[in-house]
Image: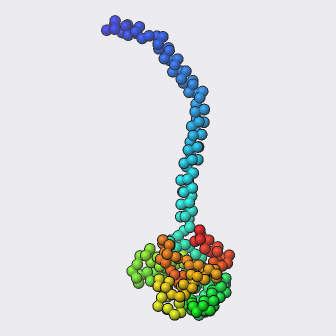
Amino acid sequence: MEQKKEINQFDIPFAKRTYLNNSNSRLLKKLLIFSPLIFILFSLTIIRLIREIGFEPLSNVNFQTERNQDHRILGHLPYKEIPKDKLVLIEPNIEVHVDMRESLLKMREEAKKDGIYLVFLSGYRSINLQNNIFYSIKSIRNQEAAERARVSAPPGYSEHSTGFAIDIGDATKRETDFETEFENTGAFKWLIKNAAKFHFKLSFNKNNKYIDYEPWHWRYEGSIDALKVFEISNK
Ligand SMILES: [Zn+2]
């Protein structure tokens, strides 16, 4: 056993051991010297990668946040109630924003000249009234909020509370009031052709993914106040 130990001790080549140690320390020194350079190169690569690949997902994230920040509820945007001093009565039970009175009445007059008789069905509606419409009809029809929201806005989310929305019917086809069939009336065809001249726009067309098509519901965008109100909706 003792002899074996001695052999083992002298058997290790001394030169070889120092050579190995030297090589390790040189490698370590090299690494220490070049480590800042390696770090810089690594950082630059990461920055380039972020710029090339990272920007697109980042902008998508921003876009998504922006979209979520429009505060829709069941597809409807929030709308404030019009200040009372901006409301005008244009006929019994129909109040609208003062900005759109002239244009709206002029549109009806022009339609009459073409043999089309427009009827105003609903203008300004208070948030309270909208509350009753949304919740009472919803319970009568035994519909869930999401289903109901396809045909009626939740309170605080109706264009009608701004005074800039008007529901229009055809005086010769009253059975189509608030019905999709209104789109087959002369009044609707006339509106599609002429409403833009009076700054009226169809709010909920067939492409709206949240809210059902409402051919009778038009909104006014002919004043700065109106444009501000519908800014987010038009984005
Ligand atoms: Zn409406």
Q: Tell me where residue 6 sits by quadrant.
A: top left
- Residue drawn at point x = 55 percent, y = 72 percent: 77
Q: Is residue 128 visible?
A: no
**In the image, residue 156 lies at what x, y percent?**
55, 77
- Residue drawn at point x = 53 percent, y = 64 percent: 68
Q: Tell me where residue 85 sits by quadrant.
A: bottom right
Q: Nearer the viewer, residue 197 or 44?
A: 197
Q: Is residue 52 left or right of residue 222?
A: left
Q: Quadrant of the N terminus?
A: top left
Q: Is residue 134 left or right of residue 235?
A: left
**In the image, residue 142 lies at what x, y percent?**
39, 80
**In the image, residue 201 lies at what x, y percent?**
59, 78
Q: Nearer the viewer, residue 127 or 123?
A: 123
- Residue drawn at point x = 60 percent, y = 27 percent: 33
What color scheme is it? rainbow
Q: Is residue 29 visible?
A: yes
- Residue drawn at point x = 64 percent, y = 81 percent: 197
In the picture shown, does residue 11 fall above or below 194?
above
Q: Nearer the viewer, residue 50 or 21?
A: 50
In the picture shown, does residue 235 fall above or below 51?
below
**In the image, residue 170 lies at what x, y percent?**
53, 90
